[in-house]
Image (tube, rainbow, N blue to C red):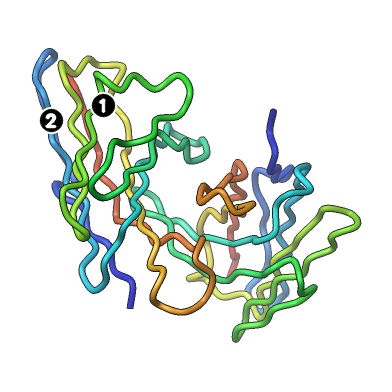
Amino acid sequence: GAVVSQHPSRVICKSGTSVKIECRSLDFQATTMFWYRQFPKQSLMLMATSNEGSKATYEQGVEKDKFLINHASLTLSTLTVTSAHPEDSSFYICSARNALAGGHQDTQYFGPGTRLTVL
Amino acid sequence: DQQVKQNSPSLSVQEGRISILNCDYTNSMFDYFLWYKKYPAEGPTFLISISSIKDKNEDGRFTVFLNKSAKHLSLHIVPSQPGDSAVYFCAASGGAQKLVFGQGTRLTINP
């Protein structure tokens, strides 16, 4: 299988606080995980590529100091939204590649997503 | 620059009939294409994929067709079922690990 979990599924926080979202690959090791953001009725926007043991690669326009990514193990990547503001409210989704599962190595398996609401 | 385009934001199909979702791409370096299904407030679920060396891949009710010369792919669902109602995203990759997603098509299956 290729199951990816996220925690929490939903979080509400006050403006100025930091929020950490965890992404875990449950039944495989993921050297690469991805973090996406989805606005209502829009497509998935890739924020960054998270590589185990090294720094994340951020997409153009994504503030790396605001969206901190840590990929400390082969099964866990975390996204921390620092000093969150209402405009950071969104649906955040992670994904992972399971290079050993057979099939194409570029297939990504997604977590269930985290709904962040910043008051 | 939208490299992957799904020009139909929505599609309604009667239960039991065929659903055809379309996707166009512009980057000739793309060599792997995927379709994902997404329900509201959930992450996308991988459905089916196709490599550029093929022009058709079938998995149960789902078939993906690839026309490289036209840079076009389509997803056929037959017969359509009420549980197929969701947003469908096509995605493409060109060996750089990243997937590029289309805007999505909302499919509604009517009883």
Host chain of mark 1: A
Report the residue marked by disc 2.
A19
Secondary structure beneath label 1 = strand
Q: Nearer the viewer, residue B43 or A51?
A: A51
Q: Which mark is residue B36?
A: none
Residue A116 position in % (x across, y down): 22, 33
Secondary structure beneath label 2 = strand
- The amino acid on which the numbered mark 1 sits, given as a three-letter code, is Phe
Q: Nearer the viewer, residue A102 or B109?
A: A102
Q: Residue at x 17, y 55 (%)?
A: A73
Report the residue marked by disc 1.
A67
Image position of B21 with respect to B55: above or below: above
The C terminus of chain B lies in quadrant: bottom right
Q: Nearer the viewer, mark 1 or mark 2?
A: 1
Q: Residue at x 70, y 71 (%)?
A: B64
Residue B102 position in % (x across, y down): 62, 44
Across the whole image, how many numbered discs are drawn on residues? 2
Name, please, the residue furthest toward the bottom.
B60
Host chain of mark 2: A
Image position of A11 with respect to B55: above or below: above
Q: Horizontal placement of B47 versus B19: left or right? A: left
User: Which mark is first along the chain, 2 or 1?
Assistant: 2
Q: Nearer the viewer, residue B61 or B85?
A: B61
The N terminus of chain B lies in quadrant: top right
Residue B88 position in % (x across, y down): 57, 56
Q: Nearer the viewer, residue A52 or B65?
A: A52
Q: Residue at x 80, y 73 (%)?
A: B55
Image position of A70 with respect to A81: above or below: below
Residue A14 position in % (x across, y down): 9, 19
Q: Residues within 10 Å of mark 1 (few under 14, many from 20)?
A: many
Q: Label 1 vs label 2: CA separation?
A: 10 Å
- The amino acid on which the numbered mark 2 sits, given as a three-letter code, is Val
